[in-house]
Amino acid sequence: MTFTQIIDFETERIDDVRELMRGYEVRMSTEGRTGGPGGRTLLRDRANPNRYLAVVEFESYEAAMANSRATETNELAQGLAALMTRPPVYTDCDVLDRQSAG
């Protein structure tokens, strides 16, 4: 079953957050890592422009947990925490249904 994690966070340094996330993704792909995120969407809250939601998709819960134990993921989490104005809130979700437009 597809697994999605939603990370709710606040920052005043979103460009730095995005750069850190892109660097992590490049590093993971060039090192040939498998089981990492299958996709990521970054959303900004219109009512609170310093609040963001990162929606990260994995092929399974097990793949997500293996990814969370990776050294690179821990380094990313530490770097992101330094850029946030409050601790992130994580919501773990099983994807039950998905529909694309068109």
Image (cartoon, rainbow, N blue to C red):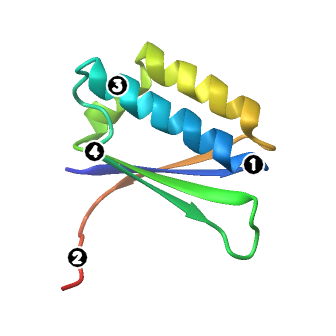
Q: Are marks 4 and 3 in contact (CB under 8 Å)?
A: no
- Find residue 11 and name its label: 1
Q: Nearer the viewer, residue 92 or 101?
A: 101
Q: Nearer the viewer, residue 16 or 52?
A: 16
In this rendering, the label closer to the viewer, 2 or 1: 1
Residue at image point 57% right, 44% down: 18
Kind of element beneath mark 1: loop
Badge 4 density bin: few <14, some 14–19, many ≥20, Cα 10 Å: some
Q: Are marks 4 and 2 in contact (CB under 8 Å)?
A: no
- Badge 4 amino acid: Gly
The residue that disc 4 covers is 38
Residue at image point 40% right, 17% down: 70
Instruction: Give the CA separation, mark 2 to mark 3.
Output: 28 Å
Instruction: Residue 90: give x, y in percent of width and height.
Output: 56, 46
Badge 3 density bin: few <14, some 14–19, many ≥20, Cα 10 Å: some
Instruction: Give the CA separation, mark 2 to mark 1.
Output: 31 Å
Kind of element beneath mark 2: loop
Decide which of tag 4 and tag 1 comes sooner along the chain.
Answer: 1
Kind of element beneath mark 3: helix
Instruction: Residue 30: give x, y in percent of width and height.
Output: 29, 22
Q: Is residue 2 left or right of residue 94?
A: left
Badge 1 density bin: few <14, some 14–19, many ≥20, Cα 10 Å: many
The residue that disc 2 covers is 99
